[in-house]
Amino acid sequence: MIPVVWDENKKSWIKAPNNSINQEYYYNYDKQIWANAVTIKDATKRAEYRNAKAGTTIDLNDVNLMLVWIPRYSYTLRDQYGYQIEGASPLSVNTPGAFDIKFVRTSTIEKGTGKYTGTTPTDYFTPSSFCWGNSCDVESTRSDSGNIELPGIWISKFELTGAISAITSLPNQTSIRNQTTSAFFNNIKSQINGDNGSNNYGLNGNYDTHMIKNTEWGAFAYLSQSKYGKYGNSNYKNANKEIYMNNYNGLKTGCSGGSPNASQSNSCQYTYEKELTGTGASTTGTIYGIYDTSGGGGEHIMGNFNSIIGLSGFNSMPERKYYNLYTSGTGIKGDATNADGTAGFYGSNYTFVNSTITWADRGGNYSQGTPTGIFYLGYNYGSAYPDGCSRLAISTW
């Protein structure tokens, strides 16, 4: 991966200085600057960028993945709706407040309720999105042999683009859609791991690239709804604390309607780099966040009820580490469903998987208005549908 920062003067991404890792000008979560990186598709170009001096412009034509780092954290939520940040609306289910979040080391696994009352944050919980293994989601088995505690996860910055046989995640591109859950899952796994991950994307070390899980969606949802995300960004007030909607019916990534509940549009009204009106559609309210989490296409997610395959196209279910298993109408702590009381935040749709319709989807689509949002939860049969998209996550250790 090549660490990148946005150059406002050049209006382009540039290679971050070699000494910028852990430095404010590469990331500063207090200022809603989340760490970004790219992968380069051509091996020769990849070597050139690795050896290039800091400040070298990154040509997005050379890039196949744009990624955002979600560092490991523990969270807790005050009372029912969190706490109110200055400039935000009074607290309600339609205008929720902030999660308390603290960044922690891999040795820290907090087991609190994730809820507290009063003014002093307590009962922190470390979500299972930062654990990689077959039994991470259950507290009593999280410490099982084979499970790995992670320092964080990479999330694709945009919905998946390109073609199902040549996956990318880039701005201003049409999302890959109309694919079954298994098609998304199998192509991500085969293309961006092992030799293919190394040769075609430049990935190395200990990592697993996979279709995003419900708990991994929750990881960036909670971070966004904190002082480190858009909710904490002082450039947005009241209702505009909510992530702006991608309302373009052409399903182009990074588009913004300039408001949380924008009506469907036949054009991309604001592109992802347009300050405030465009960047308001990211999880940070800056260009450094994750896009297309409200509207765009409805995103297939690896969250499933009772391992029922449905119309997903799987011959058998994948290993348990690749999906969140639900056996009742109750979510998993940290997954931005009902386990922490976040169901319906911002007025978003909330429909839980069940024995008939067994696969989760998130975000809503471009046509839905108010029901869309980062806390939107829907369900589907796992079959292909015209506005059905997805995104990937990379666990690294």
Image: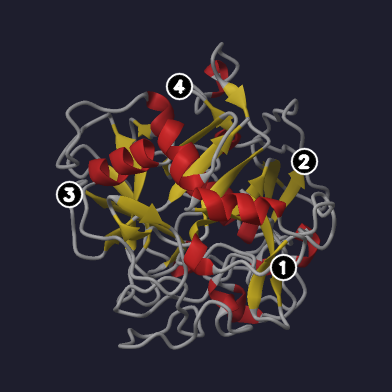
Closer to the chain start, of discs 3 and 4, is 4
Residue, x 62% and y 60% (percent of image)? 224
Residue 291, visible in the rendered structure:
yes
Spatial separation of the CA atoms under disc 3 and disc 2: 42 Å
Please, what secondary structure does the residue beneath circle 4 have?
A: loop
Q: Which of the labelled discs sits on residue 134, or is there none?
A: 4
* Circle 3 residue: 383
10 Å crowding of disc 1: few (<14), some (14-19), many (20+): many
Residue 122's label in the rendered image is 2
Instruction: Tell me the distance, in whole angstroms, between the alpha carbons under discs 4 and 1.
Output: 34 Å
- Whichever of labels 4 and 1 marks the residue nearer the N terminus, that label is 4
Q: Position of residue 215 (x, y in %)?
A: 49, 42
**Above or below: residue 117 compared with residue 144:** below
Corner quadrant of residue 194 = top left
Dots 2 and 4: beta carbons under 8 Å?
no
Q: Residue at x 75, y 67 (%)?
A: 55
Crowding at label 3, few (<14), some or many (≥20) Cα neighbours within 10 Å?
A: some
Judging depth in this view, the residue of 84 and 13 nearest the camera is 13
Q: Earlier in the sequence, mark 3 or mark 1?
A: 1
Cα gap from disc 3 to disc 4, whole angstroms: 25 Å
Task: Give residue 338's position: percent from left, percent from top.
Answer: 46, 47
